[in-house]
Image (cartoon, grey):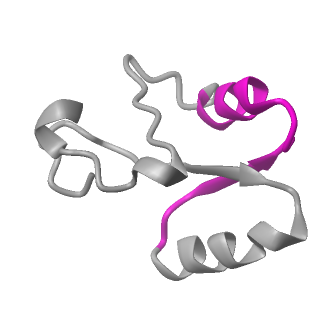
Amino acid sequence: MLKSKHIEQFIIATTTDAVDDAICDIAQKMNVPFFRGSEENVLDRFYQSAKDIKPNYVVRVTGDCQLIDAQLID
């Protein structure tokens, strides 16, 4: 994702479950914003994480697809 030519901002959208604390710790160390929301309502978590930014486009990359090709994103 870091090789994408068009991504202006990353946001990690994870759950409020304690098991995801490590994800937030890494995000903080990397200065990447994150949002914590419902584990059950993934669509709402996704929406809530982006709504204040009001982006023109959103690319959702799931945890099991983190090696997505930057050209595909672009």
Horizontal and vertical percent position of residue 10: 43, 49
> In which quarter of the view is residue 4 placed?
top left
* Depth order, front residue of 15/65: 65
Name the residue rendered at 28%, 46% in the picture.
68
Name the residue rendered at 69%, 78% in the picture.
22
Residue 25 drawn above or below residue 74? below
Name the residue rendered at 15%, 54% in the picture.
3
Q: How many marks?
A: 0
> In which quarter of the view is residue 30 placed?
bottom left
> In which quarter of the view is residue 8 placed?
top left
Horizontal and vertical percent position of residue 15: 79, 52
Specify whether residue 33 is painted magenta. Answer: yes
Specify whether residue 49 is painted magenta. Answer: yes
The answer to whether any part of residue 74 appears in the image is: no
Horizontal and vertical percent position of residue 46: 65, 32
* Residue range corresponding to the magenta coloring: 31-50
Quadrant of the rendering where the C terminus is positioned = top left
Q: Please indicate whether residue 48 sits to the left or right of residue 41 in the image.
A: left
Residue 35 drawn above or below residue 51? below
Q: Please indicate whether residue 3 sits to the left or right of residue 48 in the image.
A: left
Name the residue rendered at 37%, 20% in the picture.
57
Horizontal and vertical percent position of residue 55: 44, 23
The answer to whether any part of residue 27 appears in the image is: yes
Judged from this view, the residue extending furthest toward the front is 64
